[in-house]
Image (cartoon, helix red, strand yellow):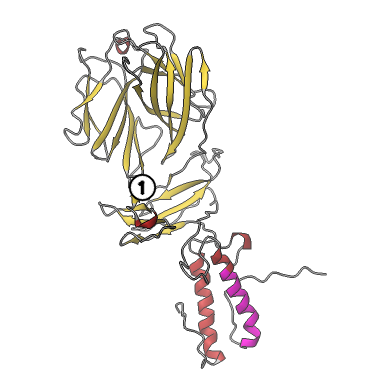
Amino acid sequence: MSYNINIPQGTDQTLQSQKQLLSNFQTIDSLFGANHYPLTGEQNYQGMHTVLTMQPQGGDPPTNATQISLYNKLDINSIPALFFAPNNSQTPIQLTYPFINTTSTNTQQYTFVAGPFVIYGGKIKNPTNGQVITLSPTSNLLYVGLTRGNSKTLSARISYAPTPTNINSPPSTFTINYENVPSTIVGDIYYLVIGQ
Amino acid sequence: MEPEEIPTFNPNVPLRKDKFNSSQLDFLTNFMTLYTAFSANHVALDATSNAGNHNVIQLLEQPAGSTFQTDLGEISIYCKAPSNTEGVSLDQGDQIFLKYQGNQPEFQLSAYQIFAPPIITGGGITQTPFFTFLPGKVLLYFGTIKCSLQGLGSTNAPLYLRPPIATNIITMNFCLQGNNAGYPPMVSIKTANGNGFYEVLYLQSTDLQPTPANQTFFYVVLANI
């Protein structure tokens, strides 16, 4: 039996309402137990949450002057994402990006910030002049910063600073450019890239 | 005298044999418990507006290793104390975790606590450090450092990572401040300390592109916790 908000009726016999009332109390107990500390548990924790399981919303919920909302909505690729709606129904902000790879043993990783923007970070070991770096997942690169590493390498110490060129040509790539150096080993390069 | 037992929610009332008279106390207890429980974190059931909305979301710590079913279309948010792959606590307190649709692997959304580490001075170097975090147990160290970089074979300028909890350096980036600035520095990373944490990077200029003395850099370093 499902939850019934219309009982007991004034005309109900005791026997008739008992089943419905019992069903309602059991349904409330069961449903409130999802995402919440159980009603039958310690009173100090009742009403608090164990997890927030958020169902996708069809649109952005309206907010008034003193409200904000956190909710799940499909992003432009139809993947569930966490959104923040500021007060007064201002433009919502997507808080999450559907992918993340921050395995510490990887030399190339990515995470995200609200927007969402993808933050790529990594190290290219002994790159060559003109080497094309392709970043995954694919995005439109908005910022590319390069830093020379492994400065104990003599060739690195006498090299010029690398610059990124050909950004997003082809998409989600940049090219490492050294001025006036042969295409030999010049030490490592760290990259910090922001894409959207 | 026995302490009075506090009535709690009873999902198994009324019994078939109960008369409404005898169930009245059970009903009252259940409705009061519901009202009180719902009032925690939620707008009260008897509020004139916004009933059912949340005022705050208090997430109770979940046991290490706990998992949640996250079906297609869903996102799960919960909190627990971070631990390493061996299950040893990282002493970060409770943090927020996310699990994407289809039971994808969880990842840590928040990390540690944010505070302003003290300014570091010494040896003609002034470093003003800050830090924050990014999803996936990534720390973002940033700030400024004023130093005089030397060329080949000279002493490097140390850039300290505070707090020293980085287990792996992912990347870094530098930008020079001011007019007549030279070129961005090269970097070498000292090996991790005895606890496995990277505490310091060393900056150095090149012979080809020397950096002016007392040059200030903005810096950003990404690291895994």
- Residue at the farthest right position: B1
* Residue at the image point whose x is 36% and y is 61% from the top: A62
Mark 1 lies on residue: A96
* Residue at the image point whose x is 46% and y is 43% from the top: B110
On the image, the x and y values in percent for residue B160 come to 48, 22
Q: Secondary structure at mark 1?
A: loop
The image shows residue B63, relative to residue B154, as above or below, that is below
Residue B219 is a magenta residue: no
Query: Is residue A79 toward the left or the right of residue B121 in the image?
Result: left
The image shows residue B207, relative to residue A177, as above or below, that is above
On the image, the x and y values in percent for residue B52 come to 47, 67
| Depth order, front residue of B203/B117 | B117
Image quarter for residue B90?
A: top right
Image quarter for residue B202?
A: top left
On the image, the x and y values in percent for residue A49 come to 52, 58
Tell me where the magenta segment starts and ends, as one range.
B20-35
What amino acid is at disc 1?
A: Thr
Examine the rendering and report whether any part of residue A119 can be seen: yes
| Depth order, front residue of A122/A125 | A122
The image shows residue B166, relative to residue A93, as above or below, that is above
Examine the rendering and report whether any part of residue B65 can be seen: no
The image shows residue B91, relative to residue B104, as above or below, that is above
Pointer 1 chain: A
